[in-house]
Image: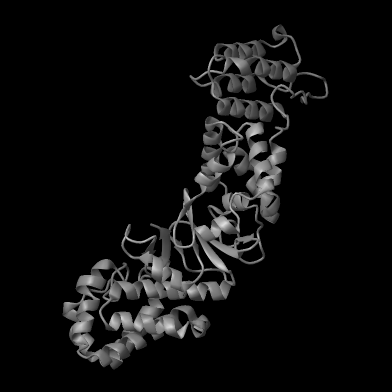
Amino acid sequence: MDIHESTNVYRNVEGDPALSDDELSYLSSSFIKEETLRRQDFEALMALTEAVVEVPEDAHPRIGELLQTLANASSGMSRSQIAELLHTTRSVLGEIDPKMEYIDHMLSEAGRFAKRLMPHMTRALRGVDTEILETFLEERQRKPYIGAKEIEAAHGSAVQWADIIRQRLSNKLDSDDIDTLVRALYEVYDDVYIGGNSGMGRGEVLYMVLADGEKPQRGDLLVPGVGELEIKGSGGRMRGVTLPVGSIKTTFKALMKMIEQEYPEIIEAKDRLPKVSPKGSSSFLSLTKKNLNEQGYPILNEVLETDERRRWFYRDLWGMYFSTLHDENYDELDKQLFEKIVESFAKGDFEKGAVAISAAQYQLYAHADGFDAMLLVDPHSFFLIHSAEDIISSGSIRKGVAPLKIDPPSIAPGDEPGAAAGLSIS
């Protein structure tokens, strides 16, 4: 259905036009920009406006003002601007926009969240012509834009979702229309979500639409051939509903008590180590680049004079860290992965050890929440993580040197939000 066919008008019970003076003024001043309507669409737009009000111009002064404003703008407005103008006109007049049927379909798998997401989705897609949206969904019905094949292609290397859409629609829509659609889908990513652990986070709705997936009982997105995916946006933390992260302040106190009792040489060297800030985000155990390479852990390894002593220390340190911070979930920690952490720190490969700690938190998170894989997303791309080993092989705490940027968990008494590691596409 296009603007030439719209005749479903709203009128009040007396048959008078539904627009007030203020509403007509709002339409005529707010939605006609400096750009102008394309001539080939103007007659249809005029017909729509006249059909909606269904009264002579002189019966309502503001109607003439609106039509004149449209006429003055008639030589070059983009298709997306026309779509936005029509959508807003219909909304003010009480007419149902024909694209709402397609938006309903796009949110059909959002379950109980669909009603709350609807106004955000409608706003994001307000500039997309109904025919463009129809073509987009028809092509998705033929084959999801992001299926098992596309998701697996993102295992080890990020994939740009817009490239997939451009390729699939290149023979069905012109480039300007595809650009309009892609811009709107970027807005879906940014603005169409419901915050909180029990909501649908940023990016979930976009990937639900592109993958034609559904919201499962556990995890964020169920995709045939892949399973239940947990979707994490840029900097997403390795914590979930069934993997709460305990108090880092309590954990830090337990670690310090252990060090005082078992490793007096570290206490004796405290003047050489970074100061502890109880209310801040610094301690000599923090996994910052500076601590890992200059001030903290290299000094610890120097103080702990033998390889055996270092291994005992890091086994005690990280064992107490995981058992205190993750409580009963600690029993599920992969023992080989734990030993990789210990060996990395004992041998002085501290950055590798920090990545392995982050990978261990992922392993506990996946086991506790029961998802099959994680889809790490940003506004432009997605990256698939199957296992903790993927984080070790593809991650670095340094930006731009590996596909994944790792923000290791904080081990400072005042940094509760940072107690879980964060992952981003590099």
- Residue 179 or residue 80, whichever sits in front: 179
In the displayed orientation, state which residue is furthest to the front. 171
Q: Is residue 59 above or below residue 198?
A: above
- Residue 59 or residue 405, whichever sits in front: 405
Q: Position of residue 39 (x, y in %)?
A: 59, 14
- Residue 57 or residue 85, whichever sits in front: 85
Residue 253 in view (yes/no): no
Q: Position of residue 42 (x, y in %)?
A: 62, 16
- Residue 345 or residue 114, whichever sits in front: 345
Q: Position of residue 128 (x, y in %)?
A: 60, 33
Residue under the point 46% across and 75% down: 246
The quadrant where residue 8 appears? top right
Q: Is residue 283 left or right of residue 49?
A: left
Residue 30 in view (yes/no): yes
Q: Is residue 128 left or right of residue 254?
A: right
Residue under the point 22% across and 91% down: 306
Rendered-image quadrant of the C terminus: bottom left
The quadrant where residue 201 appears? bottom right
Rendered-image quadrant of the N terminus: top right
Q: Is residue 202 above or below residue 99?
A: below
Residue under the point 74% across and 24% down: 6
How is this picture coloured? one colour
In the displayed orientation, state which residue is furthest to the top. 58
